[in-house]
């Protein structure tokens, strides 16, 4: 199955100005408005990761929250901002269990102080929904996504980019729950709206093209999915370049669809390109590189190129063993 681009698949975040994109384990991409505090936190996170200081960054935000609580109280805007900032950082670090109560706290405070339809409340609503989706709590995420969509439509109108983003998010949750027909309607509505308001080659539009293609593939509709995957790939190559992480996700998606359709000769060169770029950019032990290595080895084996397939599959097996040992030692 292909990789969907809201939280483009990691790696490969698709981002439009004013939005963040996050990808869950199934590859579905969520998008949502990024607030000023998100920008600050993300800058801090990038810097801390570059210097190996994630713990220091987390401690700094925790101290900021404690100071604001002591000085202003729990419902002051600065405190809510600090709560949300820490939650965003914890989520980015994969500490979902710790981020969840903070996102819930930010949502409750915004609802109490600003009302249910205030933009800050809607962002908090979407933040919590995206986190729950990433944690596999789809049933809890669905009503939050529905609320966010309904309130944004009232506030902004049906064609606003943030409304179209919320359509994408709800569709991703519905897909994860197996509600494919409902999700398809929403993905098509989001795509139609983005083509009109943002243009056919906008990154957010291409995200919707990809998401619809992944859903159609999951539904067994390969013939309709193929031109959409090709469109997403061509658009990303033109706007982001051939080696961008998001472009490689689309290339990998198309290759795996072609493989499923029995078009092995078309799929093979695509997978080779993806593997080459990922080994260079991510390293040989990155999970995405390892996945591509397995996919290419499996394809070569399927077409009878056993001598080429064997070293790739053995290499993937050896890397997998090393990663497994590392996980055991670090936990």
Image (cartoon, grey):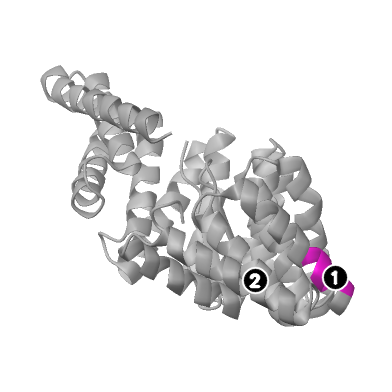
Q: Position of residue 301 (x, y in %)?
A: 23, 20
**Direction from residue 145 to residue 265 in the image, left or right:** left
302 relative position to 63: left or right:
left
Within 10 Å of disc 1 (Cα), the crowding (few <14, some 14-19, many 20+) is some
Q: Which residue is mark 2?
A: 65
Residue at 68% x, 48% y is 132
Quarter where residue 319 is shown: top left
Task: List the single residue furthest toward the front.
Answer: 70
Left or right of residue 51: residue 183: right
Q: Which residues are magenta?
A: 107-112
Estimate the x, y position of residue 18 in percent, counting from the top left: 55, 77
> In percent of the image, x 56 and y 36: which residue is there?
218
Quarter holding the C terminus is top left
Whether residue 121 appears in magenta in the rendering, the answer is: no
Residue 83 appearing in the image: yes
Above or below, comparing residue 217 to residue 273 in the picture: above
Helix, strand or loop status at disc 2: helix
In the image, residue 79 lies at what x, y percent? Answer: 71, 75
Residue carrying label 1: 111
The disc label shown at residue 130, or none = none
Q: Is residue 187 above or below residue 314?
A: below
Relative placement, left or right, of 39 versus 148 is left
Rendered residue at 70%/60% (across/down): 103
Marks 1 and 2, how far apart at CA:
19 Å
Majority secondary structure of the magenta segment? helix
Q: Nearer the viewer, mark 1 or mark 2?
A: 2
- Who comes first in sequence, dot 1 or dot 2? 2
């Amino acid at each position: 199955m292909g990789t969907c681009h809201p939280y483009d698949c990691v790696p490969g975040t698709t981002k439009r100005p004013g939005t963040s994109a996050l990808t869950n384990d199934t590859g579905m991409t969520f998008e949502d408005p990024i607030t000023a505090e998100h920008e600050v936190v993300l800058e801090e996170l990038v810097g801390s990761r570059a210097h190996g200081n994630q713990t220091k960054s987390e401690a700094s935000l925790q101290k900021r929250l404690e100071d604001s609580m002591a000085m202003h109280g729990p419902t002051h805007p600065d405190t809510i901002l600090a709560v949300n900032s820490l939650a965003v950082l914890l989520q980015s670090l994969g500490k979902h269990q710790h981020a969840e109560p903070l996102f819930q706290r930010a949502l409750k405070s915004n609802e109490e102080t600003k009302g249910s339809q205030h933009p800050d409340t809607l962002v908090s609503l979407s933040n919590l929904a995206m986190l729950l989706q990433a944690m596999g709590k789809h049933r809890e995420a669905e009503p939050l996504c529905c609320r966010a969509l309904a309130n944004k439509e009232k506030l902004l109108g049906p064609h606003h980019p943030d409304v179209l983003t919320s359509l994408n998010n709800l569709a991703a949750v519905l897909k994860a729950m197996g509600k494919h027909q409902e999700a398809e309607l929403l993905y098509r509505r989001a795509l139609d709206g983005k083509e009109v308001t943002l243009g056919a080659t906008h990154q957010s539009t291409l995200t919707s093209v990809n998401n619809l293609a992944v859903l159609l593939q999951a539904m067994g509709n390969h013939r309709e999915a193929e031109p959409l995957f090709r469109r997403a790939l061509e658009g990303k190559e033109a706007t982001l370049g051939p080696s961008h992480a998001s472009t490689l996700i689309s290339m990998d998606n198309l290759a795996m669809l072609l493989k499923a359709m029995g078009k092995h000769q078309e799929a093979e060169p695509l997978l080779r390109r993806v593997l080459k770029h990922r080994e260079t950019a991510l390293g040989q032990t990155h999970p995405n590189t390892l996945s591509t290595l397995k996919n290419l080895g499996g394809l070569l084996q399927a077409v009878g190129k056993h001598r080429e397939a064997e070293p790739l599959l053995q290499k993937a097996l050896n890397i997998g063993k090393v990663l497994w040992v590392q996980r055991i030692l670090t936990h």
